[in-house]
Image (cartoon, grey):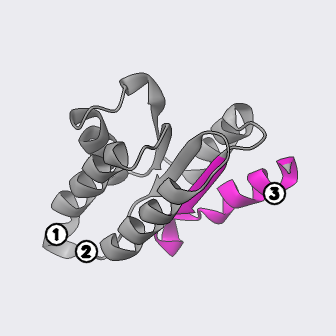
Amino acid sequence: SPPSVHSALRTLAMMEGGRKIAVLGDMLELGEHAVDAHLEIGRALHGAGIDMLLTVGQLSRLTARGAVDAGMPISSVSEFDDSSQAAREIAEKVRERDVVLVKGSRAMRMEKVVEVLLAAA
């Protein structure tokens, strides 16, 4: 849900370590609020000091657009159709001390990203 993503972003912003990376999947079941909610999350990402954004799913492409529109460099944003693709990408990009937030609706299978991160730890 949008409030839980905003809360998670605030927590991520306070974390110390390396780069702050958000891997966000579609927030499903938002109905008519889906477009605005995904755009708003994207705008909030840039203000939260996120260094890299990976999105999973069609709705999350709006999150990526919101982040870029708010000033996040397009080179810091990657978009994927499914979590398996995002998992392969994060495996190549994550470095020691990076702090990674993984969030999305259960149907987006974001646990695939978490499994890759745990295997790399």
**How many other residues sit within 10 Å of disc 2, few (<14), some (14-19) or many (≥20)?**
some
- Considering the numbered disc 3 on the image, is that residue within a helix, a strand or a loop? helix
Q: Residue at x 36, y 66 (%)?
A: 6
Rounded to the nearest angstrom, the CA distance separating label 1 from label 3 is 33 Å
Circle on res. 33: 1
Amino acid type of the residue tagged 1 in the rendering: His
Q: Which residue is mark 2?
A: 30
State how far apart marks 2 and 3 are (Cα): 30 Å
| Magenta highlight range | 99-120
Nearest to the observer: residue 110 or residue 68:
68
Percent position (x, y) of residue 107? 50, 71
Badge 2 vs badge 3, beta-carbon distance below 8 Å: no
Q: Nearer the viewer, mark 1 or mark 3?
A: 3
53 above or below 38? above
Which residue matches tag 3?
118
Question: Where is residue 104 shown, x and y percent of the image?
Answer: 48, 65
